[in-house]
Image: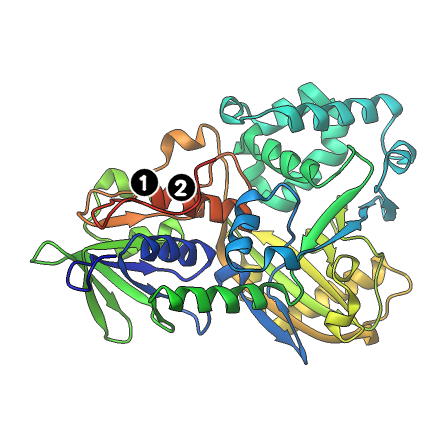
């Protein structure tokens, strides 16, 4: 181990799972690491909050059996053996009706598609699940690829409404690699094709995971600074990197890693080249509004209910209590209602009360047994930059992680190429980035590249 005088100082700006994992690996290889987070707690999109007396994740998360990177990290944290695995069900809301799509028989009974439509849809999912790499799909528009495999009627009836719910009109510029990545991950959660779907969770949710992760980071002597909003990153006269914060604090480091969304990183680094700035600002994002509702009783007992009807103001219904035992929610039901939006969508400016009213009224129409009095607590979370859209030839236009500014690196979820935004992909990105970052402090350590 290096002595303190020999340690190279690293600053990691952004305390989500990506930044935490990077800080962990850098500290393991001997660096002196300071981790900065703008919020009052670490975790980013994985952070937890309270709904009355219930503490759980701010956004919905699941673990699938194939999440090797996440499970390996949980093992290091001593939590992998705590995972609880549950077989869940899937719902589908279309033409004003709720259907179960949880097994092959229910799929075959689904009335909105003909038998040939269903055969082609099943073949699409099976083929996508067997593709090992989505790179060659980056040049193919998603609707063209889906039409070729599923047929025009299925695309118009099923795929386009689902794509529009997730991506808005950006779906028209999205590559087939996007849907391939989603199918591949969800198929991995099913033990036998369309039959059984298995998801996992750690009791206590990400609040427990993050609490343990913080303990391990501190054991590695990572200095954690909360409520530090970055203002400017620029070269220092001595060849180091100066990081300025809105609270007036500033610090210099030999190396700095920024993990925030690409447009924010571009704004913080005025010394970037024109090409780097154009690449960062050219990444298209979807934001999210997500209402968390604590209810007296369940809605439909499906983990996810996909929605194709355009009048519904949210993307899907996520019933966390179909996965997580109700005892974790004081015997109540926890439901997430996400809506994906462009970063400047006017709905982001609506009050929590207005969003709650819209969403609760839609639930009343969807579920005849639901009554607004069933809502015990509702909180609304917003993020402008969540999902980097896999536009055509996406990876060819990504900026490199190491910038033209000496000692400055930008690593964010936009670098998840041909994948989906989830905890496993985020940790995988961190593991691979940690190996690629300068190793002047010694040999990179961490998870073996898979």
Q: CA distance from mark 1 to mark 2?
A: 6 Å
The vertical placement of 306 against 17, above or below, is: above
Horizontal and vertical percent position of residue 128: 65, 26
* Residue found 75% across the figure and 23% down from its top: 123
Horizontal and vertical percent position of residue 294: 74, 71
Q: Is residue 390 visible?
A: yes
Q: How is this picture coloured?
A: rainbow
Horizontal and vertical percent position of residue 208: 58, 67
Q: From the image, tell me which residue sits under label 1.
A: 436
Horizontal and vertical percent position of residue 228: 34, 71
Q: From the image, tell me which residue sits under label 2.
A: 432
* Residue found 89% across the figure and 31% down from its top: 108
Q: Nearer the viewer, residue 33 or 380?
A: 33
**Crowdedness near tag 2: few (<14), some (14–19) or many (≥20) residues, C-alpha within 10 Å:** some
Q: Are marks 1 and 2 in contact (CB under 8 Å)?
A: yes
SS for tag 1? helix
Taking the view exactly as shown, the residue that stands out farthest to the bottom is 53
Q: Which mark is residue 242?
A: none
Judge left or right: residue 437 versus residue 106.
left
Taking the view exactly as shown, the residue that stands out farthest to the left is 237
* Residue found 53% across the figure and 26% down from its top: 133
Q: Nearer the viewer, residue 270 or 121?
A: 121
Residue 273 lies in quadrant: top left
């Amino acid at each position: 181990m290096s002595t303190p005088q020999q340690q190279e100082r690293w600053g990691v700006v952004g305390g989500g799972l990506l930044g935490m994992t990077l800080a962990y690996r850098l500290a393991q290889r001997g660096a002196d690491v300071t981790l900065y987070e703008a919020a009052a707690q670490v975790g980013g999109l994985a952070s937890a909050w309270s709904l009355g007396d219930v503490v759980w994740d701010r956004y919905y998360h699941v673990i699938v059996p194939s999440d090797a990177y996440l499970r390996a990290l949980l093992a290091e944290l001593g939590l992998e053996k705590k995972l609880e695995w549950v077989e869940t069900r899937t719902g589908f809301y279309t033409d004003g009706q709720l259907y179960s799509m949880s097994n092959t028989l229910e799929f075959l009974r689904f009335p909105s598609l003909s038998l040939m439509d269903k055969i082609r849809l099943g073949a699409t999912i099976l083929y996508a699940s067997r593709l090992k790499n989505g790179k060659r799909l980056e040049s193919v528009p998603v609707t063209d690829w889906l039409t070729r495999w599923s047929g025009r009627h299925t695309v118009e009836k099923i795929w386009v409404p689902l794509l529009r719910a997730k991506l808005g009109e950006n779906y028209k510029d999205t590559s087939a690699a996007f849907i391939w990545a989603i199918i591949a991950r969800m198929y991995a959660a099913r033990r036998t094709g369309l039959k059984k779907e298995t998801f996992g969770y750690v009791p206590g949710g990400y609040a427990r995971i993050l609490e343990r992760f913080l303990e391990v980071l501190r054991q590695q002597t990572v200095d954690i600074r909360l409520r530090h909003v970055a203002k400017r990153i620029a070269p220092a006269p001595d060849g180091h990197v100066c990081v300025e914060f809105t609270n007036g604090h500033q610090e210099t480091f030999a190396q700095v890693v920024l993990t925030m969304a690409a447009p924010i990183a571009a704004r913080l680094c005025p010394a970037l080249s024109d090409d780097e700035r154009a690449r960062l600002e050219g990444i298209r994002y979807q934001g999210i509004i997500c209402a968390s509702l604590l209810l007296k009783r369940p809605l439909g007992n499906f983990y996810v209910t996909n929605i194709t009807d355009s009048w519904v103001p949210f993307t899907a219904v996520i019933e966390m209590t179909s996965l997580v035992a109700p005892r974790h929610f004081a015997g109540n039901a926890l439901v997430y209602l996400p809506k994906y939006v462009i970063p400047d969508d006017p709905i982001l400016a609506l009050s929590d009360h207005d969003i709650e009213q819209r969403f609760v009224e839609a639930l009343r129409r969807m579920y005849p047994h639901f009554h607004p009095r069933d809502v015990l607590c509702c909180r609304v979370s917003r993020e402008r930059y969540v999902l980097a859209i896999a536009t055509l030839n996406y990876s060819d236009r990504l900026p490199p992680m190491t910038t033209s500014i000496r000692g400055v690196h930008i690593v964010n979820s936009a670098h998840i190429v041909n994948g989906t935004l989830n905890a496993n992909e985020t940790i995988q990105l961190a593991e691979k980035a940690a190996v690629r970052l300068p190793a002047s402090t010694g040999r990179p350590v961490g998870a073996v590249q898979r």
